[in-house]
Structure formats: C-alpha cells, structure tokens
C-alpha cells in the first residue's frame, strides 16, 4: 500500500489569488526561519526547549519582524 503524504496544488500566476497566496507563503517562510532561530538560540544559551506558547508570545511581541501579526488567523 502506497501512502500519499503530500498533496501538491499548482496555482498559475493568472489566478486572481496568486499574489495573495504568494505573499502568505513568503511570510510563512520568514516566520518559520524566525521561530527556528529563536528556538535554536535559546537552546544553545540555556539548554532548554522553548514551548510553543512562549514562542507565540515572543513572535507577537517582536516588532522587528511583523510577519506573524500580518498572517491571517
């Protein structure tokens, strides 16, 4: 039995939602990188893992990277 783990959807640039979705993908990439950096730095400094609720608070409070606040809920 073959399990399909990824479902790929291709949206052409002519689609009216292309620019919006492209912007969301760009912001989510930035958000992932920022969260990964915060987790890595905290772990290297303290040896403790950052809980997701704490990471949420840190990302919301960070004014340098407003991508988290700009993402739709």
Image: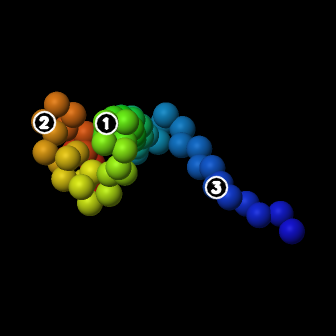
The residue drawn where x is 25% and y is 39% is 67
Q: Residue furthest top?
A: 64
Q: What separation in Å lies between label 2 and label 3 (alpha carbons)?
A: 34 Å
- Is 36 placed left or right of 66 in the picture? right
Q: Nearer the viewer, residue 69 or 18?
A: 69
Q: Which residue is mark 1?
A: 45
Residue 63 at x, y percent in the picture: 13, 36
Residue hosting label 2: 63
Quarter of the picture holding the C terminus: bottom left
Residue under the image location 48 percent in, 36 percent down: 14
What is the quadrant of residue 53 in the picture? Answer: bottom left
Characterize the local packing of mark 1: few (<14), some (14-19) or many (20 or more) Cα atoms within 10 angstroms: few
Instruction: Report x, y in % for residue 6.
Output: 65, 54
Name the mark nearer the viewer: 3 or 1: 1
In-image side of 32 versus 61 (left or right): right
Q: Residue furthest bottom?
A: 1
Q: Kindly indicate the quadrant of the structure image that contains residue 12.
A: top right
């Amino acid at each position: 039995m073959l399990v399909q783990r990824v479902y790929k959807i291709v949206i052409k640039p002519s689609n009216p939602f292309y620019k919006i979705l492209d912007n969301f993908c760009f912001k989510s990439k930035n958000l992932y990188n920022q969260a990964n950096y915060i987790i890595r730095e905290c772990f290297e400094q303290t040896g403790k893992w950052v809980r997701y609720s704490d990471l949420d608070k840190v990302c919301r409070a960070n004014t340098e990277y407003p991508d988290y606040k700009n993402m739709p809920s």
